[in-house]
Structures are given as structure tokens and as C-alpha cells.
Image (spheres, grey):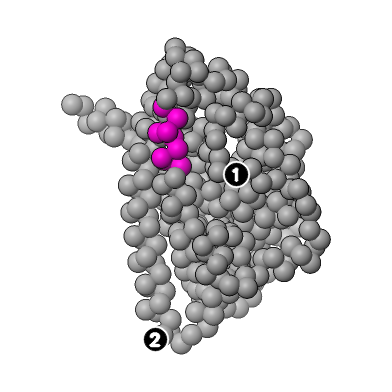
Amino acid sequence: MNVKLKKLLTNLGFQILVAMLIGIGVGAAMGKDASIFAPLGSIFIQLIKMLVIPLVTVSIIAGASSLGATKKAGKVGISTVLYFLLTTAVAVSLGIFLGEVFQPGVGLDAEAVKNAFPPEDYTGAAATPGFWDIMIGMIPANPIESLVSGNILQIIFFGLFLGIAISTLPEQKKTPIVNGLNYITEAFIWMIKIVMYTAPIGVFGLIANATGTFGFDLLKMVFNLVWVNLIGVALLLLVLYPLTLKLFSNLSVRKFFSKMTKPQIVAFSTASSMATLPVNMEVCEDELGVSKQTSSFVLPLGATINMTGNALYYALVAIFFAQMFEIPLGAPQYIAIILTATVGSIGQAGVPGPTLLVVAVLVAAKIPLEGLPLLYALDRIFDMVRTSVNITGDAACAVIVDRFNK
């Protein structure tokens, strides 16, 4: 067999795309009888749910404990992390805003959606607590109970607190703990890979059921999500980053983006911030004038924790499914989406693909996960775009931090 063909056939993204096309054909042919395949999607969702809470917990603690090293870099470390968190929060807010303005998830009958994707429960924003109720609710009275109940915000709060505490330990005490957390994360990554092998089967079952129930209306909504996401990406690249460069650096915005073409192409083709890191460092140092000391600190850290493009997507997906399931969102849900997507990015290092943090955001806002496989066939496209945004933010941060460091 041709090597390229064999590589294509074994590619998970290709398999999911084929499964989606087969599911569309089967759903169109069988109509509502295609619901017999729905349990295949339910099994896949259940496997994802099994992993999300322990993985998010361990990765948040590991990420926060490793961030403790940034204090050694003083002003550089603080300004870098602050820039990443602020731009990520802006991206999340932008995703929520675009989702509410363009409403890509509106258009299907709510009862039909619930019948096609029966979730465990539909908990909307029946009661809207006050500001202090929300703040107090983020602090777990019992962290073990938070783990059992799957309270993502409380898990993130406790995980960050514990991770920062670990980072303050002497090196000889801290190292074995951090190594142990990283080993556990690697074990979870192996489990995720195994679960993702079932993704084509799960996507087939869900798409066949969805197409049989709704025809092609649901697929049109998914493509609406794509173009709304592209609008958000354009605003980040053409407004947010140029604005921060204009305000906080001496570099020409035009020069910045002309030099960033090369790493953006690499990021788009590989969908990996880590794979793009050497190219990004070369461009920042040789063509944008960033010192080696700054680039060697900011860019690797950014490739690990700066997920601005991902954060935009997570927020948009949350709004999309809330609209699709007709779940009203109030202040607690919006705050949950913003905090989970922003702070959660710190713990995302080493986790393949965006699936688990998307799940965490949906769980935090009490939005059903059942429709998530609808997006898997297009996830490679989303991922390439997200990564291009992320590495652009890394470089912009390096330029700004270097100016202040000098």
C-alpha cells in the first residue's frame, strides 16, 4: 500500500471525517430510524466524561506548580503571565459577545434536540445569585466533594492554590511532586488517546441520529459556528494584538505581521504551538529584535499556557450549545465560562487536542455535552486557526515584555 495512503487512512482526523460523511448518508437514508445508532455516541461521551474531572484537576495543579518558576524571572515573569491571562480573558469575552450577536446555535426545535441528544439534565439559570454568592461559591468547603460533584470552578480554585503552594517548596521537595504530577498527566494522555480511537464510531452514531432527526439543518448550524469563529479570530489578529503592540511597544504593527507570516504558516499547517516554537523564536530574535533572554523565557511559556485562540473557541462553543439546547444563561454561567476558559488554559499543557477543556467549560456552565461530537469532524480546521492565533499572541507578548525589560 502507498505510504501516503496508509498514513491518511490511519489519521484520526481523516477517520472522523469519513465517519461523519457515512453518518450523514445513513441518517439521510434511514431518517428517524437512524436513532438506533445513538447509543454509540452516548458511550463515547461517557468515556470523555470519565476522564475530564481527574485530568483537569491534575493538569491545573501541575501547571500552577511549574508557574512558580516565573518568580525567578521577576518583572518578566509577572508581565508575561499577566499579558497572557488578560488577552485570554478578552478572547473569551469576545467569543461570548459574538455568540450572542450572531446566535449560530439558534434555529432548531428544542424538544426535538432534547429527544435526539438526551442529556443527564438541563440546568439553566433559574436563579441568579449575587456577585458575592458567586465568589464564595468558587471556594470549596470540601475539595473532595467538589471532585465528586464535578464542580469545575471549585476544582480550578483549589488546584491553582495547591499548585502555587507546591511551587514555594524547596527544590528537593518540589521536584518529586511535580514529576509525579507530570507522570500522572502522561498516563491520562494515554487514556485520552485510547478513548479517541473510539471517536469515529461515536461521531458516526451521533451524526447518523442527528441527520435522521433534523436533516441538514443541524449541519448548517455547525458551519455557522465556523464563520462566526473566523470573525472572532480576525478581531483578535487585526484589533487586539495590533492595539497592544501600538500601546506597549515601539515596533511597527505592519513590520510585526509581515515577519510573523512564516511562523503563522507553520502553526496553521502543524496545529502545534510546540512544533512552531523554534521558528517563532528565530523570527522574534532575528527579525523582530527581541533579546534571546526574553524570547527563551516568554515563547516556551506561551506555547504552554497561552491559549487565546482556544479560549475564543471554547466560549463560542458554550454559547452555541446553550442556544441549541435553549438553555438560558445568567451571570453565574457567563462567569463560569470566562473563568474556566481563562484559568483552565494554564493547565492545558501536554493535553492533545482541545476536547477536555471544552468539556470543562461546558460542565462549569451546566451545558449538556451530548452535541460535542458534532464538531469533531471540523476540529482540525478549528485547531489550525486557533494555533495560528496562539503563536501570534506569544510573539506579541515577547515584543512588549522585551521593550519593558530593556
Q: Which residue is mark 1?
A: 121
Q: Does the segment drawn in magenta span residue 42? A: yes
Q: Is residue 14 magenta?
A: no
Of the pair 406 and 192, the residue shown nearer to us: 192
Q: Is residue 240 left or right of residue 265?
A: right
For image coordinates 47% across by 69% down, the residue present is 62
Q: Which mark is residue 172?
A: 2
The percent coordinates of residue 151 (x first, y second) are 59, 60
Q: Residue at x 78, y 58 (%)?
A: 129
Q: Nearer the viewer, mark 1 or mark 2?
A: 1
Residue shown at 69% from the left, 29% from the top: 106
For label 1, the SS is loop
Q: In the drawing, does residue 322 fall left or right of residue 16?
A: right
Q: 263 and 52: which one is in front?
A: 52
* Residue 16 in view (yes/no): yes
- Spot the residue most to the left: 1
Residue 171 location, x and y as percent?
43, 84
Residue 17, relative to residue 294: is it above or below? above
Residue 101, how many percent across, how many down?
Answer: 77, 35
Crowd class of label 1 (few under 14; some 14 to 19; many from 20; radius 10 Å): few
Tell whether 232 sits left or right of 177: right
Mark 1–mark 2 Cα distance, whole angstroms, equals 47 Å
Say which quadrant the C terminus sits in. bottom right
| Residue 207: percent from left, percent from top | 47, 26
SS category of the residue bearing label 2: helix
Q: Residue at x 53, y 48 (%)?
A: 359
In the rendered view, tell whether residue 210 sits above or below residue 363.
above
The amino acid type found where label 1 is placed reads Asp
Picture quarter containing residue 185? bottom left
Residue 157 versus residue 270 in the image, above or below: below
Predominant SS of the magenta segment: helix
Task: Specify the segment rendered in magenta.
Answer: 37-45
